């Protein structure tokens, strides 16, 4: 039972992190003053396409790594905390 819950938590957090990072990359790109660029468009300037792809990749990878680590931390805390509390109550004083 625990493995599917952990997978669902990790997958969900990865989707949310990717979505948020992509939106953040778009906002940062607009703040720099560049026009919207599609890196797959052959008419887009190469410099802008590479910079946009690098920015998006950096933010998405960072957000997914952070989300995966946080999800693992939450999962570990939620599965070990009750066990620790039971062990401490059952331990002879």
Image (cartoon, helix red, strand yellow):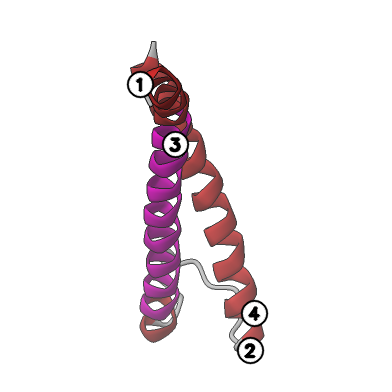
Residue at the location (34% across, 19% down)? Answer: 3
Q: Of label 4 and label 1, which has the lower sequence position?
A: 4
What residue span does the magenta drawing correspond to?
Answer: 50-78
x then y, percent, for residue 12: 51, 35
Answer yes or no: do the residues labelled 4 and 2 have beta carbons within 8 Å?
A: yes
What SS does tag 1 mark? loop
What SS does tag 2 mark? loop
x then y, percent, for residue 82: 47, 24
Residue at the location (37% across, 59% down)? Answer: 61
Question: Distance from label 4 to label 1 (Cα)?
Answer: 63 Å
- For marks 3 and 1, give the one nearer the viewer: 1
x then y, percent, for residue 8: 45, 26
- Determine if the magenta segment contains residue 93: no
> Residue 31 is drawn in which quadrant?
bottom right
Residue 33's disc number: 2
Question: Residue under circle 3?
Answer: 77
Question: Residue under circle 1?
Answer: 92
Q: Of label 3 and label 2, which has the lower sequence position?
A: 2
The residue nearer to you, when weighing 35 against 65, is 65
What SS does tag 3 mark? helix
- For marks 4 and 1, give the one nearer the viewer: 1
């Amino acid at each position: 039972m625990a493995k599917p819950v952990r997978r669902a938590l990790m997958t969900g957090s990865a989707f949310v992190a990717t979505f948020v990072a992509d939106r953040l990359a778009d906002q940062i790109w607009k703040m720099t003053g560049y026009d919207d660029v599609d890196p797959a468009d052959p008419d887009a300037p190469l410099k802008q396409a590479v910079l946009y792809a690098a920015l998006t990749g950096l933010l998405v990878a960072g957000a997914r790594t952070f989300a995966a680590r946080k999800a693992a931390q939450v999962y570990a805390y939620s599965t070990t905390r009750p066990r620790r509390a039971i062990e401490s109550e059952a331990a002879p004083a």
